[in-house]
Image: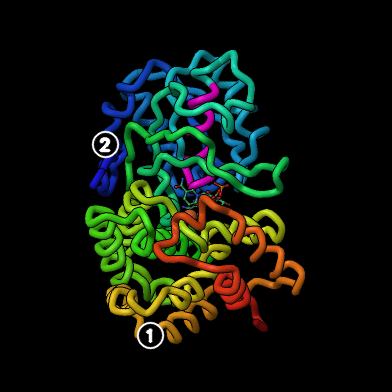
Amino acid sequence: MKFYLPTMVFQEKDAVRNHGEQMAHYGKKALIVTGRSSSKKNGALQDVIDSLEKFNTSYVVFDKVLENPGVGNIMEAAGLGRREGTDFVIGVGGGSPLDAAKAIALMIQNRDSTEEVLYQARDLRHLPVVAVPTTCGTGSEVTPYAVLTRDDLQTKQSISHTIFPALALVDGKYLEKAPLSVLVNTAVDALAHMLESYFHANATDYSRMLSQYAMEVWGVAADVLFGTEASEEDYARLMFASSLAGMAISQTGTSLPHGLSYYLTYHKGIPHGKAVGVFLAGYLDILPEEFEPQVIMALRTLGFGSIGQFAGLMKELLGSAELTGEEIEAMADGMAGNERKLAAVPFDVDRGQILKMVKSACAQP
Ligand code: NAP
Ligand code: FE
């Protein structure tokens, strides 16, 4: 078994304020990358700025990271970072700013390179990255992936470099003012990471341990997604489950639901978590019979009874995807020819099973 996770993680209330010195230690001038507004409202950006100022570290803020950022967005931020002589990057926000921070750190370090290296070269050097997550979904603070929108291919794709953040400062308090839709969409992304990693061709006892404990922690807080009022502990649990699930996929990668989701996000504008979540029950359903005891264990750990009940609750939470018959066939064709994703599935999967999964995500399959 192999286990590699080179990120220093502090997971606690006030993590950013408590570990400002650690954060400032990565360089002399930080490029802080964040989305347009949420990190100003939930206090994460101010926590980072206060901590840098306390330890006499300069910074410049790029607050224009888009949802599902594209290469142009990355190059705009990298241009600022290059001009300002920044020597480390701090991503603050959901998966979009965190993934962007990784790609930007690569493009600042390789200052004479153009955007092509994001997808062509492999494992070039990059500036150190600090990650401060404010959603409970991607686990990007502990994964080496950076998923960007590729208009040239009309899809989303992880860059070809693996970039683990050097430091992750993780605090559930940033979720406290998030709308329920953001909690639901991102917690379902984390749920997908647990399940896709658990039922993955690359799963090991280490990664399964992380997935399984993530399910347990997620299950305790899951009522929040269905409208129960959340406590401080619930927010901390959702955040912790997300990081655990991120650690699991950092070892295995994701599988068919993530592979299929990119079509829905790119062509239908469906947020990442929902785009993934609509395929989850269908994925469990096509697992061969020998996986049944593990499927039952996973669902019970999460607090669900059967695949049928799980499918119903996911539909209640997320709704369905609206796809034409042609789109359904095209998605099945695309995935049936995607060798990398097929290799992630721990059994021989055929086009018919993929088609069944896609249909199960639609309102009228
Ligand atoms: P996101 O795209 O980062 O953010 C979605 C929305 O939520 C934005 O409008 C954002 O506002 C807002 N938001 C963020 N934090 C908030 C908070 N605490 N309270 C209220 N609103 C908040 O969403 P995400 O689901 O976290 O990330 C999705 C991206 O991550 C996708 O590109 C996906 O492909 C990628 N991903 C990466 C990995 C990985 O391993 N690296 C894994 C799964 C997914 P602002 O724009 O104003 O900030
Ligand atoms: Fe995801």
SS of the residue at dot 1?
Answer: loop
| 268 in relation to 12, above or below | below
Q: In the rendered structure, which segment of residues is drawn in magenta? A: 93-107
Asked whether 291 falls inside the magenta stretch, the response is no
Where is residue 185? Give x, y as percent. Answer: 51, 63
* Residue positioned 33% across, 79% down in the render: 292
**Residue 237: quarter of image:** bottom left
Q: Residue 363 carries which label?
A: none
N-terminal-most mark, 2 or 1 = 2
Amino acid marked by disc 1: Ser
Task: From the image, give the main secondary structure of the stretch colored magenta.
Answer: helix
Indicate the colouring scheme.
rainbow
Q: Quadrant of the C terminus?
A: bottom right
Asked whether 94 falls inside the magenta stretch, the response is yes
Q: Mark 2 points at which residue?
A: 8
- Image side of residue 237 versus residue 341, left or right: left
Where is residue 195? Give x, y as percent. Answer: 38, 65
* Residue positioned 34% across, 30% down in the render: 51
Q: Alpha carbon of mark 2 to alpha carbon of mark 1: how far?
A: 37 Å
Mark 2 vs 1: CB contact within 8 A: no
* Residue positioned 70% across, 72% down in the render: 322
Amino acid marked by disc 2: Met
Q: Mark 1 points at which residue?
A: 306
Q: Can residue 35 be seen in this view?
A: yes
Q: How many marks?
A: 2
- Image side of residue 182 versus residue 171, left or right: right
